[in-house]
Structure formats: structure tokens, C-alpha cells
Amino acid sequence: MSGVRVLVGTRKGAFVLTSDGKRQKWDVSGPHFAGWEIYHVKGSPVDPDRIWVSQSSGWFGQLIQRSNDGGRTFEPVGNKFAYDGVPGTHQWYDGTPHPWEFKRVWHLEPSLSDPDTVYAGVEDAALFKTTDGGQSWDELSGLRGHGSGPKWAPGAGGMCLHTILIDPANPDRIFIAISAAGAFRTDDGGATWKPINQGLHSQYIPDPKAEVGHCVHRIAMHPSKPNTLFMQKHWDVMRSDDAGDSWHEVSGNLPTDFGFPIDVHAHEPETIYVVPIKSDSEHYVMDGKLRVYRSRSGGNEWEALTKGLPQQDCYVNVLRDAMAVDSLDSCGIYFGTTGGQVYASADSGDSWAPIVRDLPAVLSVEVQTLA
Amino acid sequence: MTARVRVALPEHLRNLAKVGDEVELDVATPVTTAAILDALEARYPMLGGTIRDYGTHRRRAFVRFFACGEDVSHEPADAAVPAAVASGTEPFLVVGATAGG
């Protein structure tokens, strides 16, 4: 019987939540790596038993863990993330040059075709790749070498490369996003990159043609339409239909267009989800109500999804990597909050129920659809 | 020449290396902080990068070293540790600093 496995990274460990296809009763295992910050947990689409974990700590640095048995056991693999050549400098908060320094891995994106190949997005922003199952990691330094690197500056959460999208039709095409440098695309497997930020407008960037500097929070893509991208920016929900060459705003009737996550329905490429929060200075949902917003028209027209979600006295946030969708016939949507709840909907967002309510603050949510 | 040295690790690193309160290592003489960490990382490769930086070998900011009740974190890595540690009478302590929230 089909089922799902939800992989949850939190401030204090990882949790694995499993259920059958009904997604009503859940088994919860964890915390794995108790006490460590788990920025991301993601399974290989080629081999679902292979799961990758970014484990970090302010005391002891970065580790990468790998499971080969669906999350029952893990083993540490290579954790040496050395920038290629002389790292150089980026722009610091005060505008001065600041040396590139590795801090942590924000996002792990397994290859769509090879279980031993994984991309890692790190802070300070760079993209690394392993092709030997995580034993060694090499920087795809063409990204930082693009030339705009000295102008990149950290967002409030650090200068992180947090989004990696691989074009399923063309593995040489990869999209990445960095806070607060913007979005970039490679068409040659990572050797060279171009910024794809035209059409983005940010209040604090006076140049409407600015090549970099936009605080992109998250990008999502439906695998059947890889040229269509949806972006949750610092403010604004954006859309591109030309693989990022140009963007236009689709915030429409959202009550606020500030937020972090954005995702696409598994079977409806024009159905997208966001969780708006009040503002850049108040990182929690508006009016004490936890509302997911869904657009079935690829943006602009949004409806609030509230059934089963708290509608009073709720002041949580949903972080950029903390939303995911399964691919069962009735598409499941999942998200985790900074208050430690993980909510699931088995009906495309029409109704919700918590899987767990009291985990540490949730940093990431991914889901595997199991045969 | 090697010396038998006892090393105590903080809980997170004990869990990572799957070891108990202390490990015993054969450390090249003269016994220094660097020599102890070289032996530790050779025996437990998963600890690489968790105590000191891979490239520079600089101690991570929130890790401290103690020997015979003294904080030796700021001693040169190639300075000899106290004789009681080098002889295995006293353990070399790797400690997660009380900081970070």
C-alpha cells in the first residue's frame, strides 16, 4: 500500500513522520541527532531509502549524515566544504568587503538520476556537489565566479544559498537562489551562471535593472513545466514563464505578500501555495490566524485555507524550506511552523490537521511518496 | 614513540563517535594539543571539522580544552600538555563552551 514519509528538520533534531496513503494516523520517530540544528532532510528521488541530512551546531560545526535504510539508521559522511581557490570577499552589512566564510549547509538537493550525486547550498553562499555518495564535496565555483560576488550581501538570516531546483527535462539546467543576492541559472551543469532577477522590484534597491541584491526567499517549480517558476520574495510573490529571464508579480489579493515558503501542487501546475506573514519586522501570521493561501490560477487570485488551522492567538512563522507536497492521487500538502507544529492536508489544502504539535521550531519539511 | 593519553569528549561528540565518557589514544610524542587531536581524528574520522577547522586547524570558537584543571585553549597547539596528561594520569578535556543559547 502506498504511503508517505515526512522528513522534518528542527532547531533541536530531526523527526521522521510516516503514514499510509490515508494520512490520518502517523508514526513519529525522533529526535534523531538530538540537540543539533537540522537545517534540511531530503530523500533521493532515485532511491527513497537514501536520505540526506544537514546537521550543524554553533559549537561543533557542520556534519552531513546519510541513511541507506529509509531513516532507521544514519552514518556521517564527508563534511569538508572548502571553497575553491581564494574565497575572496562579499559585501558585509555595513557595505565593507567581508571574507567568504563557510558556516553551514542550508539545503541538500539530491540528483534526479543518480543516488550518489547531491547538491549542497551553503552559507556563505556557494553551491557544492558530491558525486561519490557524500564522501567528498566540490564547489561549483562558477557561481561565485560569476563576477557579481563582491556585491552579494547577507540577508538577516545570513548569506545563504537556500534553493536548488534541477530541471527534470534538462539536468544541465539548475536554478538556485541566495539571500540576499537573488536567483541564478546555469545551463551547462554548473560551470557558468547568470543572474535571473529582471522584473524583481525591491524598495531598497533603486535601480530597477539591478542584476543582484534582491532577497529571494524561495522558488518553486512544477516538474511538468520547468520554464515556469514561482517565487516568494522578501515582499512580493512573483512568476516567470521563461525560466527566470523575466518576472512579474502575482501577489494579487493576498492580504500581505511577505513570506517565506512557496510550493506547487503535485498534479496541477497552476495551483500554488504560500503562507503570508505580517511583515519584514513582524515574522508571524497576520491577525493571529494561520492561513495557507492557494491560487488555482498560477497567482493573482488567492483563497485562504483555514479549515483545521488555528484562527486565533496564533503567532508562528513558516520558514522557507518548511513546506512540501506529496504525489499521491489526492495531493498532500505539509508545512511546519516555528512553534513546532507540523500540519498535513490530504485534500490539496481544503482541510488540515496537525501531525505533531510540540516539536522544536521547524526549519524544514520534505515528503517522500512511497510505493 | 607514542604515549597513552585519555581524552574526554562532550556529549554531542561522544554520541557522534559512539564512544563512552573517555577514549584512550596512542599519541605521538611530544604530546601536544595538536598531536592529541591528530590521533583523535585519525581514530574517529567523523570528528573531523567538529573541534578544529580542517584547513587552518584553528580551534572552533565554542570549543575549549582543559588539562589538570587549567584552560589551555589559548596555548599554542604545538605546546606540550602537562605531564599528568601526557602520562595518562589526567584526561585531556574537550569541552563545549557555555555559550550559544
Image (cartoon, coloured by chain):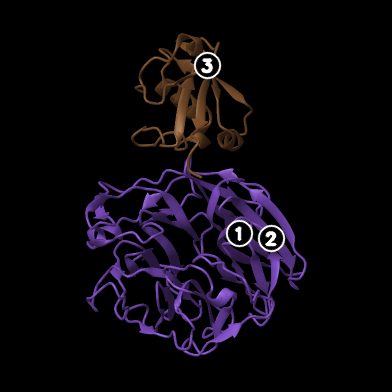
> Can you identify the residue that label 3 sits on?
B5
Q: Secondary structure at mark 3?
A: strand
Indicate which disc residue A8 carries. Answer: 1
Task: Classify B16 as above or below A159.
Answer: above
Q: Report x, y in % for residue B12.
A: 57, 37
Task: Classify A69 as above or below B94.
Answer: below
Q: Which chain is mark 1 on?
A: A
> Can you identify the residue that label 2 sits on?
A17
Indicate which disc residue B75 carries. Answer: none
Q: Report x, y in % for residue A339.
A: 60, 62
The brown one among the chains is B
Front residue of this view, candidates B98 and A115: B98
Is there one chain holding both mark 1 and mark 3?
Answer: no
> Is disc 2 in contact with disc 1, using a CB cutoff of under 8 Å?
yes
Q: CA distance from mark 1 to mark 3?
A: 40 Å
Q: CA distance from mark 2 to mark 1?
A: 8 Å
- Disc 2 marks a residue whose amino acid type is Leu
Q: Report x, y in % for residue A103.
A: 40, 48
Residue A359 lies left or right of residue A190; in this view the side is right
Front residue of this view, candidates A340 and A288: A288
Q: Earlier in the sequence, mark 2 or mark 1?
A: 1
Count of numbered tags: 3
- Disc 1 marks a residue whose amino acid type is Val
Is there one chain holding both mark 2 and mark 3?
Answer: no
The purple one among the chains is A
